[in-house]
Amino acid sequence: MPPLAPSGRDILHREPQMADATKSEADSVVAEFFAQALKEKAGK
């Protein structure tokens, strides 16, 4: 039997320190997204 994918329960039982992404990583992704969106809007 193949291993099961983690469920929502897995997330609930994680330690709070085990973040999927740090705030700075998340902020850089958001900034990159908005920079791309503004570039596309300016090109139209």
Image (cartoon, grey):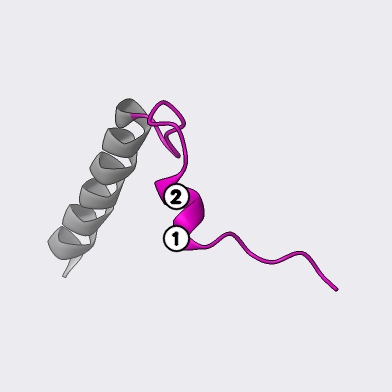
Residue depicted at x 31% and y 27%? 24
| Residue highlighted by disc 2 | 11
Corner quadrant of residue 37 = bottom left
Q: Is residue 10 above or below residue 2?
A: above
Which portion, as a residue range, is magenta? 1-22
Residue depicted at x 24% and y 40%? 31
Q: Position of residue 6 (x, y in %)?
A: 58, 59
Corner quadrant of residue 20 = top left
Quarter of the image that includes the C terminus: bottom left
Left-right relation of 23 to 42: right
Cβ atoms at labels 2 and 1 below 8 Å apart: yes
Q: Position of residue 25 (x, y in %)?
A: 37, 32
Give the spatial CA distance, label 2 vs label 1: 5 Å
Residue depicted at x 82% and y 70%? 2
Q: Is residue 25 above or below residue 44?
A: above
Left-right relation of 35 to 13: left
Q: Residue furthest right?
A: 1
- Name the residue type under label 2: Ile
Q: Residue furthest bottom?
A: 1
Q: Position of residue 40 (x, y in %)?
A: 23, 62
Residue depicted at x 85% and y 73%? 1
42 drawn magenta: no
| Residue highlighted by disc 1 | 8
Q: Pointer 2: residues within 10 angstroms few (<14), some, or many (20+)?
A: few
Secondary structure beneath dot 1 equals: helix
- Name the residue type under label 1: Gly
Q: Is residue 39 above or below residue 4?
A: above
Secondary structure beneath dot 2 equals: helix
